[in-house]
C-alpha cells in the first residue's frame, strides 16, 4: 500500500502534482519539456514583518555565499542564486528533480526601506535577509500642542422651539 500526502490547503497544487505524475508516466521524461513546472518559483520565499524590519527567508540548501546576489532598488528586493549542475558522469539518472541553473526572485516590498542597512545571513541552508524600514515608513506619534490663547465662550441664549401646530387627523 502506498500512502501519499496531499496538501488539501492548496488543491491547485494537488491537481498540478497529479497532472505531472500522469504526464511523466505517459510521456516519460519528455513531459518536462511540454509541461514545465511553471508557477513553482525557485526558491520559495517567506516575507514577513518583524517590528520595524521586513524579513525574507529562503531555503537554499547547499549554496555558498558566492552563489548569491541580493540587491534592493526601487522598492523591490531582488534575490538571484546560482545552483551549479553537478551531474556525475558514470551514473544513469532516472529522475532529476533538484533544480539547477540561475534563479531570480523579485519581491515588491510593502514599505519604504533603508537600502543601506540591509543584511543577509546564510545559516544551515536558510538565507535570512533583514530589510529595515525607512524612517518615513515607520509610524510616528504626533504631539498635539496648545497655542496658549484661550477662547472666551459666550453663554448662548436659550433657543425657543417653534410653536407646535395641531395636525388634523
Image (cartoon, helix red, strand yellow):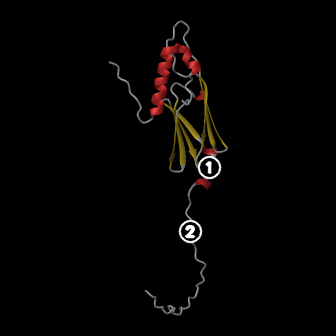
Instruction: Judge by depth and name the residue closer to the eye, 166 or 4.
Output: 166
Which one is closest to the eye, mark 2 or mark 1?
Answer: 1
Q: Which residue is pictured at 47% across the width and 25% down the height?
A: 17
In the rendered structure, the answer to whether residue 85 lies left or right of residue 4 reads right
> Residue 150 appears in which quarter of the rendering?
bottom right
Disc 1 marks which residue?
A: 112
| Quadrant showing the C terminus | bottom left
Q: Tell me the crowding category of disc 1: few under 14, some 14 to 19, or many 20 or more residues within 10 angstroms, Cα based.
A: some
User: How many tags in the picture?
Assistant: 2
> CB of mark 2 within 8 Å of CB of mark 1?
no
Q: Tell me the crowding category of disc 2: few under 14, some 14 to 19, or many 20 or more residues within 10 angstroms, Cα based.
A: few
Query: Is residue 89 shown above or below 83?
Result: above
Residue furthest front in the image: 169
Q: Which residue is pictured at 50% across the width and 50% down the height?
A: 51
The Cα–Cα distance between marks 2 and 1, rounded to whole angstroms, is 23 Å
Dot 2 falls on a residue whose secondary structure is: loop
Disc 2 marks which residue?
A: 143
Mark 2 or mark 1: name the one nearer the start of the chain: 1
Q: Which residue is pictured at 32% across the width and 18% down the height?
A: 1
Q: Which residue is pictured at 52% across the width and 24% down the height?
A: 62
Residue 67 percent location from the top left of the image: 60, 27
Residue 130 percent location from the top left of the image: 55, 42
> Residue 89 appears in which quarter of the rendering?
top right
Residue 107 percent location from the top left of the image: 59, 39
Residue furthest right in the image: 74
Query: Is residue 21 shown above or below 140?
Result: above
Dot 1 falls on a residue whose secondary structure is: loop
In the rendered structure, the answer to whether residue 10 lies left or right of residue 135 reads left
Query: Is residue 16 shown above or below 85?
Result: below
Instruction: Judge by depth and name the residue closer to the eye, 65 or 99.
Output: 99
Amino acid at each position: 500500500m502506498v500512502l501519499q500526502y496531499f496538501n488539501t490547503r492548496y488543491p491547485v497544487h494537488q491537481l498540478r502534482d497529479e497532472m505531472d505524475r500522469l504526464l511523466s508516466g505517459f510521456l516519460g521524461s519528455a513531459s518536462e519539456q511540454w509541461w514545465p513546472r511553471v508557477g513553482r518559483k525557485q526558491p520559495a520565499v517567506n516575507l514577513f514583518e518583524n517590528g520595524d524590519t521586513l524579513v525574507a527567508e529562503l531555503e537554499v540548501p547547499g549554496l555558498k555565499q558566492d552563489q548569491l546576489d541580493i540587491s534592493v532598488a526601487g522598492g523591490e528586493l531582488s534575490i538571484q542564486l546560482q545552483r551549479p549542475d553537478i551531474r556525475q558522469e558514470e551514473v544513469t539518472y532516472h529522475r532529476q528533480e533538484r533544480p539547477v541553473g540561475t534563479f531570480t526572485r523579485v519581491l515588491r516590498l510593502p514599505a519604504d526601506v533603508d537600502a543601506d542597512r540591509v543584511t543577509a545571513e546564510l545559516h544551515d541552508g536558510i538565507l535570512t535577509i533583514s530589510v529595515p524600514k525607512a524612517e518615513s515608513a515607520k509610524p510616528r506619534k504626533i504631539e498635539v500642542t496648545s497655542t496658549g490663547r484661550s477662547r472666551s465662550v459666550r453663554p448662548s441664549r436659550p433657543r425657543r422651539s417653534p410653536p407646535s401646530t395641531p395636525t388634523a387627523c
